[in-house]
Image: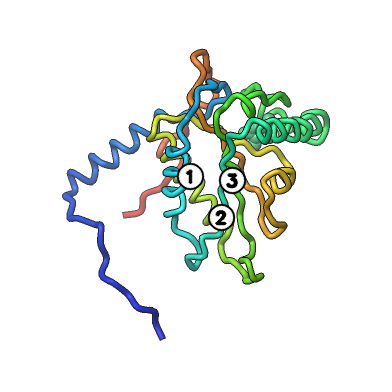
Amino acid sequence: MSEEHVPLEGYSPVTDVQMTARAADMLKLLLTRRTIRDFADTAVPRETIETAIRAAATAPNGANQQPWHFAAISNPDMKRRIRLAAEEEERAFYGGRASEEWLDALSPLGTDASKPFLETAPWLIAIFAQKKGPNGEKHYYVTESVGIAIGMLITTLHAAGLATLTHTPAPMNFLREICQRPTTEKPLVLLVVGHPAANATVPVHALQKKTLEQIAKIWE
Ligand code: IYR
């Protein structure tokens, strides 16, 4: 027995020329996105964040289970607690937990255990993946689904004119406690959101993108 269906809406005819131009416009916009670590403390309206989360939650996902939770935090006390907990993990990471190989791969970024942006930036969005539903029911393709939603969140925030940092202090279990989430949820990403600081810089390393030939093979 199949569920009820309704006619598709929202797609209007588009010529090949329009299609190619729209894709090129989107590429141009996305090419200007940079991950940054220097944020201004300028406030960002709650409505912008709420709209971006609603955009993220349109993501395709397994069996429409929508297995995500977004904890959006501008509360200074919570941001401080997150910073302190993240820096503790990062000190362990940089102070011995990470392999030499990993630290070598990171060295062009110039990162270290200090994470002042977790307090400076106006918003932190902790994204949780719900491995199970509220009644213990299995969720499918959870990491894929939430990963896609995070990509759409980052894209929407960028289109709105905001900068982000996809931050993954590991392990991130402290986020579960601070955001009061159940153990059935796994913190996946801590997204730092705000305006870039006037003096923000980006590592040259990060500007070097692989070519289309390096990342794709087109079979016609
Ligand atoms: N989580 C650490 C280390 C780190 C790891 C990767 I992979 C990066 O692309 C950047 C940093 C930190 O935030 O410093």
SS for callout 1: helix
User: Of discs 1 and 3, which sits in the foreground?
Assistant: 3
Q: Residue at x 53, y 17 (%)?
A: 201
Disc 2: CA contacts within 10 A as few (<14), some (14-19) or many (>=20): many
Q: Is residue 10 in view from this perspective? A: yes
Q: Residue type at mark 1?
A: Gly
Find residue 56 and report its horizontal and vertical position in percent. Answer: 45, 49
Quadrant containing the N terminus is bottom left
User: Of discs 2 and 3, which sits in the foreground?
Assistant: 3
SS for callout 3: strand
Q: Where residue 151 is drawn, which disc sits there?
A: 1
Q: Which residue is mark 2?
A: 68
Q: Residue at x 49, y 50 (%)?
A: 149
Q: Where residue 71 is drawn, which disc sits there?
A: 3
Q: Is residue 205 above or below residue 135?
A: above
Distance from Cα at disc 2 to Cα at disc 3: 10 Å
